[in-house]
Image (tube, rainbow, N blue to C red):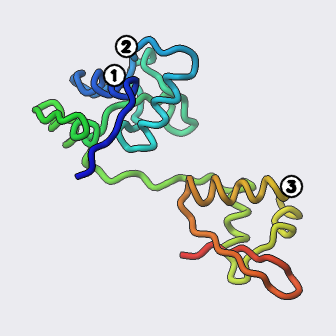
Amino acid sequence: MTQIQLSDAQSVILSTACARDDGAVFPVTTTLKGGAVGNVCKSLLNRGLIEEIEATDLNTVWRHDEERGPITLRATPLAYTALGIADETSEAVRAETATAPEPVKRRSGTKQQVMIDMLSRPDGATIEEIADITGWRSHTIRGSMSGALKKKLGLTITSEKVDGRGRVYNITC
């Protein structure tokens, strides 16, 4: 198994969370300033070392979600493994987090969903066609395809040049 490299701040936050009975990240004990705690937590989230759960204590809220309400963070089983911790606490957290991850929820009726629907058609869509429907500019559409659709949602987008239409983009399965 590959060793996970952690920065000093990531190590402090993660080891403090793993030392707690419930694996809670908050309250953070490190002296990071400004948005640094948020940046460290985001990187740990992206690496799967911490996860979002519903908050029961309002002093430990990470963010507010429209559907689930207040959200906090806790260490995942991968965090215990990365730090080399294997005890009954980590086993209890592992058993608690053994459920399958929730699928990505997308709101219907958004411009992003409209763009996904257009790109999912058999004949795909051009930047101009998407711009006509969404009102977005071309650079916003390309950025959304690259960032939100490819990187965040993990969709595969292909493009090809079609005579009479120009460059056509498709979402492939």
Q: Residue at x 69, y 68 (%)?
A: 117
Name the N-terminal-most of marks 3 and 1: 1
Q: Distance between the residues labelled 2 and 3?
A: 44 Å
Instruction: List the residue tagged with mark 3.
Output: 137
Indicate the amino acid at tag 1: Val
Q: Distance between the residues labelled 3 and 1?
A: 43 Å
- Residue 37 coordinates in the image, percent (x, y): 49, 22
Q: Is mark 2 on a helix, strand or loop?
A: loop
Instruction: List the residue tagged with mark 1.
Output: 12
Indicate the amino acid at tag 2: Thr
2 vs 1, front mark: 1
Q: Distance between the residues labelled 2 and 1?
A: 8 Å
Instruction: List the residue tagged with mark 2.
Output: 29
* Disc 1: CA contacts within 10 A as few (<14), some (14-19) or many (>=20): some
Q: Do the residues labelled 3 and 1 touch (CB within 8 Å)?
A: no
Q: Residue at x 59, y 60 (%)?
A: 150
Q: Are marks 2 and 1 in contact (CB under 8 Å)?
A: yes
Name the N-terminal-most of marks 2 and 1: 1
- Residue 11 coordinates in the image, percent (x, y): 33, 27
Q: What element carries label 1?
A: helix
